[in-house]
Image (tube, grey):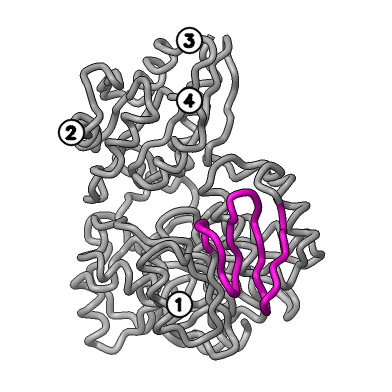
Amino acid sequence: MSEYLDKLKGKRIAVIGIGISNTPLIKLLLKNGCSVTACDKKSRSHFGGLTEELEGLGAELRLGENYLDGLDHDIIFRTPGMRPDVPQLLEAVSRGAEISSEMEAFFEVCPCNIVAVTGSDGKTTTTTIISELLKASGRRVYLGGNIGTPLFSLAGGMEKDDWAVLELSSFQLMTMKRSPHIAVVTNLAPNHLDYHKSMDEYIEAKENIFRYQSAEDLLVLNACNEITNGFKNTARGLIRMFSINGGLEDGVFFDGGAIVRAKEGKTTEIIKAGDIKLPGLHNIENFMAAFAAVGDIVGYDICRKVTMEFAGVEHRIELVRELRGVSYYNDSIASSPSRTIAGLRSFKKKVILIAGGYDKNISYDELGPEIVRHVKTLVLTGNTALKIRAATEKAPEYTEGNPAIMQIEDFGDAVRAAAGVAKEGDIVILSPASASFDRFKNFAERGETFKKIVNELE
């Protein structure tokens, strides 16, 4: 870490985005004598006392609409949400600037083993399971990336035998030039096409998680996803597959009743499906991916113990409360149709679904038929409400009133309307199938808002 920071001294550094991941980066650079310009589109009033704190440490601030003007710095750390080909960055590169990010810098300085997970769905749960498995085996684990704590500022305290477990988005991977020791790709389906120019670009970004692996590194792939299964043809390291649809010669698979490990011609049952605490086939896939990644390191007994105890991550089919016989679930992390479908399939009866949000320019055609099969009342809100309604109404099995559809603009009113039609024994679930950015800064804020409203119901 100190060697990396020493190389930055004397260089003019710009950090674009004063957010959760970049703020610790800015502070660390300043405290180590670096010249830093912190840039953000938001105004000074948005940050409260943070701007004064950063200026007190020596930062120059560029805030407001013109925050990207005059990027004549030597090194520019971009926020993951900014494409690397915006004109101001391209112009800076043409003048010799180096473009990096907090996560790319962490890969450069991290002294320990790195496990990283990406995919369209299941990233957060799989990443969290891996961290729990490693912690249960006595390892010191740092959880970060797209979830958890920004890790660059903590790298100086890490030791060789520690483990960094990361969730990585396509935004973070887009310009990555390093890959982890163990890489996991849960699945791939159209997503974030509001950000990426094409599905091909989205896939190419995801491939960076294994593109720079060595022959000794491990790549874990979903054998049942056409795109991820194809990655085995270009992988440089060892390959281990997982499959929800039965036998593999070497990997982790589900035989219909249990999760099984196949290795060197032998099969070992890890855990029966009935002993898994989290419901749903999608969670069986998440556990299989985690076992394939670190099962040989932590042992089957630990895999079994963690799987029987792990209650899931916040905002993922999270039981909020039961009120007058109605169960309320927060699935705010479901920001794609495929993840909402997985959530709907987790319940054995039809639910009252609250859906809709920011439009990522993806299709909802596959969601419509699933809503008809699994939803009794559909409450729509947000920018994608009309698209989800259209997909539902054109589903082959749809008939008027099956499901009943309510379209309500205000998020709070939508939640209260869902509660208003719920009867004893019903399930109400927020599973938006859309991103949160039309109204909230992220899915967590959306989920917290939902929980607050639900907990205030009388």
Which residue position is annotated with label 1? Answer: 35
Q: Amino acid at mark 1?
A: Ser
- The percent coordinates of residue 3 (x first, y second) are 60, 88
Magenta segment includes 94 = no
Which-is-in-front pick, marks 4 and 1? 4
> Which tag, 4 or 1, sits closer to the chain's start?
1
Q: Is residue 340 above or below residue 299?
A: above
Q: Secondary structure at mark 4?
A: loop
Q: Amino acid at mark 3?
A: Lys
Residue drawn at point x = 48 percent, y = 35 percent: 447
> Which tag, 2 or 1, sits closer to the chain's start?
1
- The percent coordinates of residue 317 (x first, y second) are 53, 37
Magenta segment includes 266 = yes
- The percent coordinates of residue 114 (x first, y second) are 61, 74
Which residue position is annotated with label 2? Answer: 394
The crowding category of the residue bearing disc 2, from other C-alpha atoms within 10 Å (few below 14, some 14 to 19, many at least 20), is few
The crowding category of the residue bearing disc 3, from other C-alpha atoms within 10 Å (few below 14, some 14 to 19, many at least 20), is few
Q: Is 350 in front, or is 219?
A: 350
> Which tag, 3 or 4, sits closer to the chain's start?
4
Range covered by the magenta-colored residues: 243-271
Which-is-in-front pick, marks 1 and 3? 3
Which-is-in-front pick, marks 2 and 1? 2
Residue drawn at point x = 63 percent, y = 49 percent: 257
Q: Amino acid at mark 4?
A: Lys
Q: Amino acid at mark 2?
A: Lys
Q: Which label number is shown at residue 349?
A: 4
Which residue position is annotated with label 3? Answer: 423
Q: Is 40 in front, or is 428?
A: 428
How far is disc 2 from disc 3 in space, using C-alphas?
28 Å
Q: Secondary structure at mark 3?
A: loop
Q: Is residue 194 above or below residue 96?
A: above
